[in-house]
Amino acid sequence: MTEQIYSTDAYAKEMAAKVVDVDADDGRVLLDRTVFYPGGGGQPYDTGVLRIGDDQLEVTRVTSDGHGVWHWVDGSSLPSVGTGVIGAVDWERRYVLMRTHTAMHAMCGVVWDRFKSPVTGGDMREGVGRLDFELPQWDPEDRDPIESEVNRQLGLALPIEVEFLPRAEADLDPSLIRTKVSLLPSSLREVRVIDIVGLDRQADGGTHVSSTTEVGSIEITKVESKGKGFRRIRFQLTGEVE
Ligand SMILES: [Zn+2]
C-alpha cells in the first residue's frame, strides 16, 4: 500500500518516493508514498509532476485501488520499479480545492444545525461546489441567513482537526456518517474524521485547510429543487486569501 501523506499532512506539496509497480499498458506508476490525492468524496484528484533526474513527467490523473495510489503520466518512457522520483502537486489548484472542500463542510454544519438535514450528495471543482440535501422544509427566504451563517462561522477562525478513530468507536457515533447514502466499508479498521471544531464533524478522506479563515467567504449562487423535498445548494468562493 502507498503511504498517503495527504491524509495526515494536507499541506505537503512534494515528496520523494520510489516506484513500486509499473503498468505500461495504462501508462501509470504505483509509488510507495505520495502527496497526490487520488480523488473521492467529491474532491477531484490532484495533478502535478514527477521528476526523475532531469526528466519531468506530467501527472494527468491519480487513482487508488487495493494496491495503492497510481499516478497516470504523460510520456512514452515510464520509470522502472525501484526508481526514485520527486513528486510535486499543482499546489495552486490543490489549495483552492482544499478551501472549497472545507467550505462544503461548513455548509453541511450550518444546514445540519438549522434543519437536521443529511447530505445526499456533493461535488466540487476549483472554487465552486454543490451539495444536495434532503430538505423538505426549505423556504427561499432561508438562502440569505444560511449564506450569512456560513460566512460568520468561517470568520471565527475555527480549527480543522484530523483524527483517526478505531472502527468500533466510530460505529458508536452515527452522526459521523453524515452522508445519508454512503456507509463505510466493513473492512475499514480505522476511520478518518474531519472536525471543524464546534461546527461539523464527519468521516472523510479528503484534504482540508487547517483554519476556516483560509476559506475566505462564500456566496450561494443557486438553490435548485431536485425532486420532492430535495434541494441542491450551489456556492462559490468569494474571499481572496493573502
Ligand atoms: Zn471533507
Image (cartoon, rainbow, N blue to C red):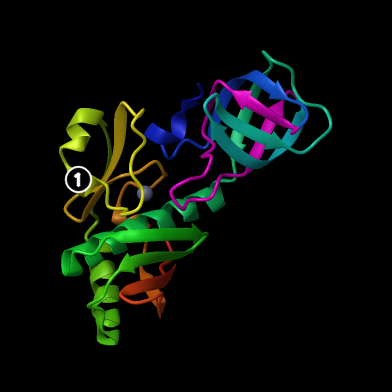
**Disc 1 marks which amino acid?**
Pro
Q: Is residue 88 magenta?
A: no
Q: Nearer the viewer, residue 228 or 117?
A: 228
Residue at left 65%, top 23%?
85
Which quadrant is home to the C terminus?
bottom left
Q: Is residue 44 magenta?
A: yes
Give the residue at the far right of this rendering: 76
Magenta-drawn stretch, dominant element (helix, strand or loop): loop
Q: Is residue 117 above or below residue 41?
A: below
Query: How far across and how far down the image is residue 212, in percent?
Result: 30, 56
Residue to which mark 1 is pinned? 174
For residue 56, side relative to residue 198 (left or right): right
Q: State which quadrant residue 154 falls in.
A: bottom left
Q: In this view, does 137 lie above or below 62?
A: below
Q: Give the range drawn in magenta.
A: 26-53
Give the residue at the far front of this rendering: 228
Q: State which quadrant residue 233 falls in.
A: bottom left
Q: In this view, does 134 lie above or below 21?
A: below
Query: How far across and how far down the image is residue 158, in percent?
Result: 23, 53
Give the residue at the far bottom of this rendering: 141
Residue at left 41%, top 54%?
101
Q: In this view, does 156 lie above or below 175?
A: below
Query: How far across and how far down the image is residue 240, in percent?
Result: 44, 65
Q: Can residue 242 be seen in this view?
A: no
Q: Is residue 165 visible?
A: yes
Q: Nearer the viewer, residue 64 or 147?
A: 64
Residue at left 67%, top 27%?
29
